């Protein structure tokens, strides 16, 4: 006899069936009444077990439609190649990567003159509250919200690169635009963290209960000083990042890319 509460036994059994493919992505689970009969448990117990799976991001619920297994069509981003000008690009790095994966990119922009928050100012080595330009992108893959990207540029750089204040897309990408002005990004420092989304992040990325966000902070450097700080917020259930560092000649073609 299991010592776990009955609702956890229900959740564990359904989780195993989801993992094994009995209920695949997009599949509807049996109704609460059917599960109540199957597990010989009350509707409240069944509902508690299902709520646990919702909080884990495995299933979603819709009013009047019951529960279904979340679809996870994961997009893989090679972070070591992203924005690297030595690799061919057709436009900016995001559009190139999404298109090369056989998917459809779409993004909206917002550009505003703002002040640098303390955590951004520290990375840009400017005074907190000093002027900066924020370029904010809301990005989609196949019309599904994929990420938001907030890039802060220090005021001294904007004076040398005025197109950074333009409200629309910079077709060749900002990294390539700056390089064309002699402001070359020669290195970057990445920071990666996870947490649960804020209400605004959950709205923009259409994140359901139990799904975290992946925060990718990249500070880009010219030979002399930092030139930008970018914070990309990804849906944790639809994205995977990888890096390729060093000599990978021994890597098998069958290994995950």
Image: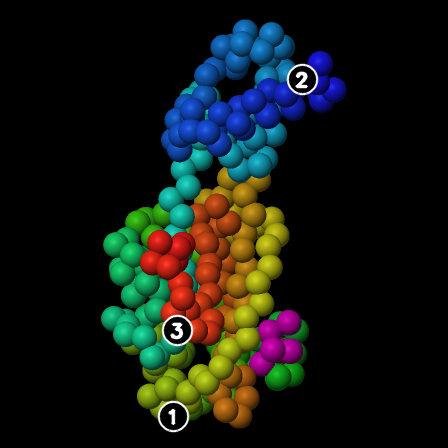
Check residue 83 in the rendering and tell me which mark sits there, or answer none. Answer: 3
Give the residue at mark 2: 6
Residue at 44%, 52% (x, y): give it. Answer: 239
Dot 2: what SS? helix
Residue 203 appearing in the image: no
- Which of 139 and 167 lies nearest the eye of the viewer? 139
Task: Examine the structure image and report whether residue 132 is included in the region drawn in magenta.
Answer: no
Q: CA distance from mark 3 to mark 1?
A: 16 Å
Viewer can see residue 143: yes
Q: Which residues are magenta?
A: 119-124
Q: Secondary structure at mark 3?
A: loop
Q: Sort mark 3 into few (<14), some (14-19) or many (20+) by Cα contacts within 10 Å.
A: many
Closer to the N terminus: mark 1 or mark 2?
A: 2
Q: Earlier in the sequence, mark 3 or mark 2?
A: 2
Categorize mark 1 by other alpha carbons within 10 Å: few (<14), some (14-19), many (20+).
few
Q: Main secondary structure of the magenta part?
A: helix
Measure the alpha-carbon separation of dots 3 and 2.
Answer: 50 Å
In the image, what residue occupies the spot 57% across and 36% down?
56
The mark nearer the N terminus, 3 or 1, is 3
Display colour scheme: rainbow
Query: Which residue in the protein does label 1 denote?
Result: 182
Q: Position of residue 132 (x, y in %)?
A: 53, 79
Q: Residue at x 40, y 33 (%)?
A: 25
| Marks 3 and 1 close (CB-CB < 8 Å) | no
Q: Residues within 10 Å of mark 2 (few under 14, many from 20)?
A: some
Q: In the picture provided, is 2 more to the left or to the right than 115? A: right
């Amino acid at each position: 006899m299991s010592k776990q509460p009955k609702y956890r036994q229900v959740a564990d059994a359904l989780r195993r069936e989801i993992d094994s493919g009995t209920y695949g992505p997009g599949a509807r689970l049996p109704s609460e009444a059917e599960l109540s009969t199957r597990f010989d448990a009350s509707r409240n117990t069944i509902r508690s077990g299902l709520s646990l799976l919702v909080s884990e991001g495995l299933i979603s619920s819709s009013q009047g439609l019951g529960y279904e297994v979340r679809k996870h069509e994961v997009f893989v981003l090679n972070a070591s190649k992203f924005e690297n000008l030595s690799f061919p690009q057709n436009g900016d790095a995001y559009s190139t990567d999404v298109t090369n994966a056989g998917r459809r990119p779409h993004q909206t922009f917002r550009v505003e003159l703002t002040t640098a928050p303390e955590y951004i100012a520290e990375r840009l080595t400017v005074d907190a509250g000093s002027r900066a330009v924020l370029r904010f992108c809301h990005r989609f893959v196949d019309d599904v919200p994929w990420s938001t990207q907030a890039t802060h540029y220090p005021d001294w750089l904007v004076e040398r690169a005025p197109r950074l204040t333009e409200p629309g897309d910079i077709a060749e990408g900002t990294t390539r635009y700056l390089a064309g002005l002699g402001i070359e990004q020669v290195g970057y420092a990445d920071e990666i963290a996870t947490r649960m989304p804020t209400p605004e992040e959950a709205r923009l990325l259409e994140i359901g209960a139990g799904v975290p966000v992946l925060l990718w902070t990249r500070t880009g450097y010219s030979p002399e000083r930092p030139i930008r700080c970018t914070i990309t917020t990804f849906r944790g259930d639809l994205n995977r990042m990888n890096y390729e560092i060093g000599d990978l000649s021994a890597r098998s073609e069958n290994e995950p890319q």
